[in-house]
Image (tube, rainbow, N blue to C red):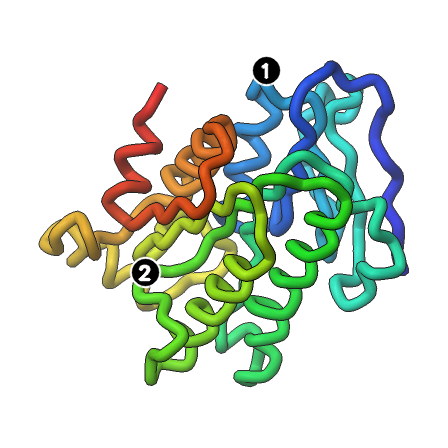
Amino acid sequence: MNDAAISGSGAAEGRTVLLIGATGLVGSACLRLLMADPTVGRVRTLTRRPLAHLPAAWTRDGKLAQQVADFGELEAHPEWLACTQVICALGTTMRQAGSGAAFRKVDHDYVLNVASIALAQGASHFLVVSSMGADAQSANFYYRVKGEVEDDLKALGYASLTIARPSLLLGERAEWRWGEEVGKRLGVLLPPRWRPIEAEQVAAALVQASRLPDIGVRLLENAQIRKMALSP
């Protein structure tokens, strides 16, 4: 396994948040917000490739701890998942995955495995990016997988589980996506429940929800995500 050096050791007191998917659209926005949050003492990242172009201050002050990991072998290093809370923005697309089985491995198996190990390591709150329309009984494979992972996460017994169900995510991506371009143009015509949403808003809602008391299962639908993102 390719290990990245743990950055620093002198983080201030506060919550330890494990961020999964920090290189993605929502995850990278979460990372910026968590690093600026004074209630967070340590941010730990697990990524499949090293984080790039980080501000020098992030690696100097000891708040950020990075680990490059094979998500299929996390059981060998459960200590990497020791934290207070997990924000999971891990996910792929059918096109990127190449098959239904490969998609399910990332969006279901890896997510559930992270949640299980982190819970055993003491995490009390798991926050995850799911999808509008998630339903374990759906005829649509994508929505069915999202619904299945939601149900399986609920069964783990976290003190608090926050599930964000955004619509089409908007943001600056490395690759052009036809569906997103259409969403940008036509999304304003849709009601708030279905309107495409900026990844920054989803990240802001997740970080805001991470500050709330443990209350069991909290579902954030698309319109609720927007509302929470505006909370101070």
Q: Nearer the viewer, residue 167 or 183?
A: 167
Q: Earlier in the sequence, mark 1 or mark 2?
A: 1
Question: Where, quadrant-wise, is the C terminus in this rendering?
Answer: top left
Residue 166: give x, y in percent of width and height: 34, 53
Measured Cα–Cα span from mark 1 to mark 2: 31 Å
| Image coordinates for residue 90, horizontal then vertical, percent | 58, 56
Identify the residue position indicated by label 1 in the image. Answer: 38
Q: Residues within 10 Å of mark 2 (few under 14, many from 20)?
A: some
In the rendered image, which quarter is residue 230 located in? Answer: top left
Q: Which residue is mark 2?
A: 132
Callout 2: SS: loop
Which amino acid type corresponds to the residue marked 1 in the rendered image?
Pro
Image: 150 above or below 188: below
- The image position of residue 85, as x and y in percent, is 62, 38
Tell me the amino acid under the disc marked 2.
Met
Residue name at image x 51 percent, y 51 percent: 128
Q: Quadrant of the N terminus?
A: bottom right
